[in-house]
Amino acid sequence: MPQDKTYDMVVYNGTVLTVNRTFDVLEKGLVLIADGRLERMEEKASKQALPKARQVIDAQGGIIMPGLVNTHTHAPMSLFRGLADDLPLMTWLNDYIFKVEGRWLNPETVHTATLLSCAEMLLSGTTTFCDGYFFEDSVAEAVKESGMRAILGQGIVDFPAPGVPEPGKNVAEALRFIQEWQGKTSLIEAGLFCHSPYTCSEETLRQARRVADDTGSLFQIHVAETQDEVRAVEAKHGLSPLQYLDKLGVLKPRTLLVHAIWVHEADMACMARSDVGISVTTESEMKLASGVPPVPAFLKKGLSVGIGTDGCASNNNLDMLQEMDFLSKLHKVKHLDPTVLPAQEVLYLATRGGAEAIGLGGQTGSLEVGKRADLIIIQTHRPHLTPLYDPASHLVYAASGSDVQDVIIDGQLVVRDRTVLTIKVEEVMTAVEALAREIAS
Amino acid sequence: MPQDKTYDMVVYNGTVLTVNRTFDVLEKGLVLIADGRLERMEEKASKQALPKARQVIDAQGGIIMPGLVNTHTHAPMSLFRGLADDLPLMTWLNDYIFKVEGRWLNPETVHTATLLSCAEMLLSGTTTFCDGYFFEDSVAEAVKESGMRAILGQGIVDFPAPGVPEPGKNVAEALRFIQEWQGKTSLIEAGLFCHSPYTCSEETLRQARRVADDTGSLFQIHVAETQDEVRAVEAKHGLSPLQYLDKLGVLKPRTLLVHAIWVHEADMACMARSDVGISVTTESEMKLASGVPPVPAFLKKGLSVGIGTDGCASNNNLDMLQEMDFLSKLHKVKHLDPTVLPAQEVLYLATRGGAEAIGLGGQTGSLEVGKRADLIIIQTHRPHLTPLYDPASHLVYAASGSDVQDVIIDGQLVVRDRTVLTIKVEEVMTAVEALAREIAS
């Protein structure tokens, strides 16, 4: 190591989980950051002096790991967290969610609620997320302030939607959003989010696909979420939702399929052939009783899978550490096989796997020299994480978001000792609480 | 309220969830405690002065609720948290757990590891737990120090066990433990824990039942946990595990059946007739891939059900708030019905339901005048619990153990602002970490 070099940041005194191809672990690791990227990583010899750096972060013996990648959110829905639960899906959507969305969403409320979600995500270790919603410009403004990395998709649906009263202009509005935000900041990538094959027409889906292709952006869509959806699409098009999307030419690289629960072998063959990404949102899919996607089969077939929380009206939090726990345990009991989805594999899905599924694998998702410096520090000296035999086991089965101590994104410290440095969290909570009082009354 | 009365403690400035028969909620509630019991509860008028009290606890706008009741633990197993995961059950037990138990358990390590578990349980809001393990005297000593309420069962198994090298003396040892601890402190009730119908002989089960009856103590047993167990018991006795226990006269009031996963209608009829309690340990049952017990059917039949975490070698924490989340969501997706196990019902199971299942319903499990003062305060002014429309929803779907701020047991403050007042947590963690280094090497 050149002795005279001064780094922007050094992180030391922790166990580094790289989540690289060989899952290398650096005991007493040293992570050196310059220009927002990981410049060097090594084990620190006991008498070795720390290299010079403008900022020195002591991990206090904790775990230093890649920031978590949440591949599916509707960030502004934190406004409706716990407003309605334990209801049939259509009652929940039609009698509660769509009504409050129509009544309460505007650029200002979306901005405020997104800041709240960003604070929650940061405090639970998420550094990158992939969002789909309406008033996505306001989401982007909030994300920019938060310092998070994100892919943001403007929502497309064939009925009047928040901010898009004329459905005929939905794809044009998404294009405008993409053009507005593409390249504006290095941390935000703009894209689009078609709601589903049953709420978007053939023409809408084709147009949206064209926009995504022309702009090189991510095409997100909910698909095969419920048995009702499968029946409806089959009745109308004579094809499964996946095969219908395939026929329309929607399935290709830079597509993120969200849920993909009710799929069969032929569907999975389509997915594998077209090199799409998949986001599974276990807690939300359990809570809404949608079903259980065949995640072990996806992985066996080499499909690219990431983990998402979904919006926190159906979860009801954005805690990716808990999400890992649910994913692993649900599939173990479903298959009556405790070896399914072991801790290390689940940790991969929540980090590098997720980054790859949304097309950011080159930038983030693991701690490897050359990647952007997105990392988090987990404090393990706590009763529920004591003793520590295996860091991956603790992360998946014992930790929760509140064990995250520090968060660094693109080389910038955004959470220090559980304080978010980029968002006025007290003010945001107060504003959301005031809004919620109006919504409840 | 008599103006001159001085209470031992007053808790104010929070929303009180009583979890009584009618699930009453007191906004801006006032909880008055004297002699370790709940003496009075009411809503505080805005200008009303606080009554006089030796100790005043400000809930800071949070939720004041009954302490959580963990109906199944093996407290000392925190020593083996994360030592071995993702393995077939028999490999996990025979190649790891039984080996390290045999090698590392002694009165001192059991005492230390139990203190660690008590600290973890207190910090996540559990005030009462029901344990079954070996060296249970050491468990009892630790629990006494911690200030927790517990039912502790000395383990009984028909092979050499930690502290009981001669299986022939297993029931006598349990009787000795019960006689030693029965009535020693008001917070600890001594009982026994037969490991299972396949590791205890007919004669052992009958003798243990007699001891439990003679001493009026709780009889705990794992039963119908795996399909293999059912097959083995059926092959040997020609009866299902439940019907076999029924034939032996084991099933009667003051029995806690743990797991009860692989049961059919006739088994449930047995259980209902004999007025037993049931402990479901969702996360552990998922992680070990044991199966999913028919909890909605249990409740429909009026069976007495509580929630447990199991030992944290198979969970891997003791967080009852997360356990509620898993229970509710697992049964929703299993039945493809989001209305199954709604938040309020799950909250009941984790508190009053659990207390009733282990026979402590008269003392704890709800905030009702006359019961012992076992209560916790949840801090809700946090991003992941904002906004708050429905406290029960947040407790089940959004909160985790780290949201517990204060814990009061039997009228004594044992956790204040997330600091355990009864246990030297740093010393205990250091001791367990040192032990774990030896175990790992």
Image (cartoon, coloured by chain):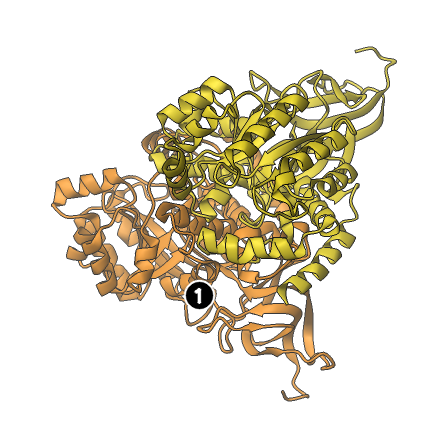
Chain colours: A orange, B yellow
A83 versus A346 height, above or below:
above
User: Residue at point 24% right, 50% down?
Assistant: A263
The quadrant of the image that shows the C terminus of chain B is bottom right
Residue B291, x across and y down, in percent: 41, 41
- Foreground residue, B82 or A112? B82
* Residue B246 in sight: yes
Q: Mark 1 lies on which chain?
A: A
Residue A391, x across and y down, in percent: 57, 62
* Residue B341 in sight: no
Q: Please indicate whether residue B271 sits to the left or right of residue A10 in the image.
A: left
Q: Which residue lies furthest to the left in this view?
A: A238
- Residue corresponding to mark 1: A352
Label 1 neighbourhood size at 10 Å, few (<14), some (14-19), many (20+)? many
Q: Please indicate whether residue A378 sits to the left or right of residue A265 in the image.
A: right
Q: Say which element carries label 1.
A: helix
Q: Residue furthest top?
A: B2
B341 versus B101 height, above or below:
above
Q: Image quarter for residue A102?
A: top left
User: Residue at point 49% right, 19% down?
Assistant: B274
Q: Please indicate whether residue B176 sits to the left or right of residue A199 in the image.
A: right
